[in-house]
């Protein structure tokens, strides 16, 4: 058979078409192979994202519950024995330690805040027991009650010391205990009157009406930004701060304002605080934290990391 010139190009065109069709089939087959893999990878990614979101939601719920417990403990009245609340807080710390949804910093933060609020509860309760002991001291018929109160005071005071009570608190409590023991039951002798006056002065010096149970530090001074203006602290504690050189708008006791606080301008925490007092003549503004320990505890940690022990 003779192949004509017109037949040859037709044959070559058919071959090219067949090759093209074959290549397309291979591409389609490869596409069909890759699509399930891509879908599986996408599904896995979406599943991981959903799991991470669910974990974050549970983590936040956990932190919110813990925060409520700690804040409530910080508001307990001084006359209430803190032992039961302290046990619940300890149980929460143990549960948090094993909680998979919490990050290591979450667990350490809960532990530190619980230790702090327990210390404050016990210090306030010791203060209350000392008041009760002094009241009982003035009545000879309550001598046995006084002795029981003092025994309970010593036990609660030992717990507060283990939790880290400052030397000023420890010294004041020891002084008050000594005064109470020296005061005569009748409370009418000259020495008894002198002791009562000394006891009142000691109490006001270390346990003023404001219930100032936090150690106050002057160094390092903190940077505080209010309404875009920067100030420095005269002193601060885990419960509040005193700003000097304040020339902002007048503030009333109980006002809530947003501030940014930190060791320097580069690392500031945002927090809402409550005005305790504003002395316009002295240009001083006293603020207290609305949430127990709040960001001030974070700043204390920053000090520890930086090797700057507050003083």
Image (spheres, grey):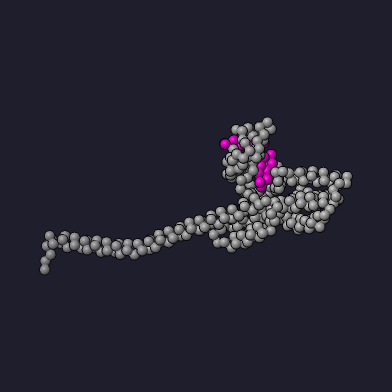
Q: Main secondary structure of the magenta part?
A: strand
Q: Is residue 270 above or below residue 248?
A: below
User: Which residue is situated farthest in the right direction here?
Assistant: 190
Residue 138 placement, left or right of 104: right
- Residue at the image position 61 percent from the left and 45 percent from the top: 290
- Residue at the image position 68 percent from the left and 49 percent from the top: 307
Residue 46 placement, left or right of 82: left
Q: In this view, does 229 lie above or below 154?
A: above
In front: 59, or 20?
59
Picture coordinates of residue 77, whole percent (x, y): 67, 51
Quadrant in the rendering for residue 4: bottom left
What is the tally of numbered marks visible in this picture?
0
- Residue at the image position 81 percent from the left and 46 percent from the top: 199
| Residue 263 counted in the magenta span | no
In front: 281, or 33?
281
Picture coordinates of residue 31, whole percent (x, y): 32, 62
Residue 308 placement, left or right of 98: right
User: Which residue is situated farthest in the bottom direction here?
Assistant: 1
Find the magenta span and give its range: 227-245
- Residue at the image position 11 percent from the left and 66 percent from the top: 2
Work out which quarter of the rendered image holds the N terminus and state it: bottom left
Picture coordinates of residue 55, whole percent (x, y): 50, 58
In front: 122, or 78?
78
Work out which quarter of the rendered image holds the C terminus and state it: top right
Quadrant in the rendering for residue 251: top right
User: Which residue is situated farthest in the top direction here?
Assistant: 281
Picture coordinates of residue 46, whole percent (x, y): 42, 58
Residue 27 in view, yes or no: yes
Residue 112 in view, yes or no: no
């Amino acid at each position: 058979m003779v192949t004509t010139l017109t037949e040859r190009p037709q044959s070559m065109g058919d071959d090219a078409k067949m090759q093209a069709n074959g290549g397309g089939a291979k591409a389609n087959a490869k596409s069909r192979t890759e699509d399930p893999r891509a879908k599986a990878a996408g599904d896995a990614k979406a599943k991981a994202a959903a799991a991470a979101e669910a974990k974050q939601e549970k983590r936040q719920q956990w932190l919110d519950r813990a925060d409520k417990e700690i804040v409530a403990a910080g508001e307990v009245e001084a006359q209430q024995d803190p032992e039961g609340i302290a046990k619940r807080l300890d149980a929460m710390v143990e549960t948090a330690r094993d909680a998979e949804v919490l990050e290591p910093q979450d667990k350490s933060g809960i532990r530190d805040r619980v230790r702090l609020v327990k210390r404050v509860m016990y210090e306030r309760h010791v203060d209350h027991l000392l008041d009760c002991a002094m009241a009982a001291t003035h009545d000879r018929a309550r001598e046995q009650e006084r002795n029981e109160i003092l025994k309970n005071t010593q036990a609660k005071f030992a717990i507060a010391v283990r939790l880290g009570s400052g030397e000023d608190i420890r010294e004041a409590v020891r002084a008050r205990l000594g005064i109470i023991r020296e005061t005569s039951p009748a409370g009418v002798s000259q020495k008894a009157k002198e002791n009562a006056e000394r006891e009142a002065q000691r109490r006001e010096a270390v346990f003023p009406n404001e219930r100032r149970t936090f150690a106050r530090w002057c160094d390092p001074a903190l940077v505080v930004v209010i309404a875009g203006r920067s100030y420095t602290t005269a002193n601060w504690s885990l419960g509040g701060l005193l700003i000097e050189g304040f020339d902002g708008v007048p503030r009333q006791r109980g006002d809530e304002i947003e501030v940014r606080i930190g060791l320097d301008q580069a690392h500031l925490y945002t927090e809402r605080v409550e005005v305790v007092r504003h002395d316009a003549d002295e240009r001083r503004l006293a603020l207290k934290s609305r949430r127990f320990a709040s960001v001030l505890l974070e700043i204390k940690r920053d000090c520890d990391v930086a090797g700057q022990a507050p003083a």
